[in-house]
Every structure is written in C-alpha cells, then in structure tokens.
Image (cartoon, rainbow, N blue to C red):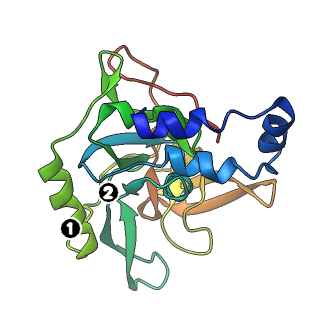
Amino acid sequence: MGMAQSEILGELVPAMSAQNAWLSGNGAWRGVVKRALAPDYSEGRAWFVVRTNPGCEDRALATLGSAGYDAFLPKGKREIVHHRTKAKIERTFPLLVGYAFLAMPLDRRVQHWGVVRECHGVHSVLGMGGAPLALPGREVEALRLADRQGRIRVARAQWTAQKGQTARVLAGPFFSFTGEILDADAQGSVTLLINFLNKPTHLVLPVDELELVCELPVQTENECLFSAAT
C-alpha cells in the first residue's frame, strides 16, 4: 500500500461500534476506504488473467468494474444454422470461456489482490511460482482493440457429445443455459438436463446447437488460486 493510502487509512481507524456499522453497510467511512483501495492507473498498468466461476463471466466483470478495476472479456462472432428453420444466426461468444483480462496498477505495492478475491464471480488469478503472472501489455491492448472494433471471429470447435459432459445451449429460448448431457445418439441428438425455474428440465437438441463447457481443472503448483464468493 502506498504512503498516501496508508496515511488515509491510519486516520480512519474506527471504534468497534463504527467497525460493526461498516460491516453492516451503514458506516459513513466505508466509501472513503473503498476509494482509498481503488486502483490507481496513473503510473501505468499491468495485465493479468482471472478465471471466473462457471457461467459467471459477466458477473465477474460487473463486480470488478464496481471496485474500480479495468477488466474485459474479448468476444467474437460466430454464425450458426438453426436446426429447424435452417436460418443463419450470428451470435456473440466469449473468445476464452471462463477467463477475463484484468488491469492492475503497475506499482506492485498497490496491487490489492485481496479486493480482487472478494469480487463475486472471480474464481482465481493465473500465475506461476505462487504469484500472479503479468502478460505482455502490447498484445493484450491489441486484442482489446480488435474486440472493440468487432473484428474477432470465433471458429466452431468440433466435438462429440458424451454422457456426463457439461454443455451450453447456443440458440433458441434456452440460449446460454448449461446442463449435463444425459444421452447422445448417432444422429446427433443430445438430451441435456438443465435447471429451469429451480426444476430439473430435459431438453433434446442437435449437437450443433451446443458447445462443450470445460470443467475447472484441479489447482496446480503453477497457478495462484484465490477462493472467492460466487
């Protein structure tokens, strides 16, 4: 933590009653502390990768943004064909499902990873040797520019549906729903179990309207993981 922030927080050490008020959301000084911990990009930024909880990419971006962080999830366009109408539909999909890019202040003393950890939807931060790993800034900025200009296209991955896999719906009224594959036949029809209105619901869809969702792998020594709220 920088000197200015240390001085600010040092002047704000409250009585226990004030601490309890802050924890309950009623403390008047809560906003001051939040501003003191907000990222300061005035001296530059370094880019990192955060892994999100399954299906929580947008939630992670929203909570990181509300904490003052600059983060983005590159998305690309893909053309799919509706299995009944045969109409071509252009959809937008994440380029890297389950991952987002996060900018942190260049000064490591004010990289508050604890704040990142508390952001809803954030599962972990990728790193090596027990520390977050910074990415080449020029490449990340180029990717962000391409994302803003809508120049990214997402190729259709070829895969074979198997029982027990997790898949995401790509079209129709259940677009973006994820569920477990219960059955898949030789004709390309897949039975998917989803949670709809808190009730288990079976869908039968062609494999072309689904995409495989990779499960989060087990933590390795080369990854810096933070447990976080969902």
What type is the residue that disc 1 sits on? Leu
Q: Which residue is mark 2?
A: 95
What type is the residue that disc 2 sits on? Leu
The residue that appears at 43% across and 40% down in the rendered structure is 4
Q: Quadrant of the N terminus?
A: top left
The residue that appears at 83% across and 30% down in the rendered structure is 16
Query: Where 34 falls versus 165 (above or below)?
Result: below
Residue 123 seen from this side:
no
- Residue in front for this viewpoint, 55 or 71: 71
**Numbered disc in front, either 1 or 2:** 1
Query: Where 182 falls versus 144 (above or below)?
Result: above
Position of 215 compared to 191: left or right? left
Q: Quadrant of residue 46?
A: top left
Residue 201 is situated, as x and y percent measured from the top left of the image, at: 74, 56
View extreme (left): residue: 138
Residue 138 is situated, as x and y percent measured from the top left of the image, at: 12, 52
Q: Quadrant of the C terminus?
A: top right
Residue 136 seen from this side:
yes
Q: Which residue is mark 1?
A: 145
Residue 182 is situated, as x and y percent measured from the top left of the image, at: 62, 44
Cα distance between the residues tagged 1 and 2: 14 Å
Give the class, few, some or many, for how many residues have Cα within 10 Å of label 2's Cα (few <14, many ≥20). some
Please tell me which of labels 1 and 2 falls first in the chain.
2
Helix, strand or loop under label 2: loop
- Residue in front for this viewpoint, 140 or 24: 24
Position of 126 compared to 189: left or right? left
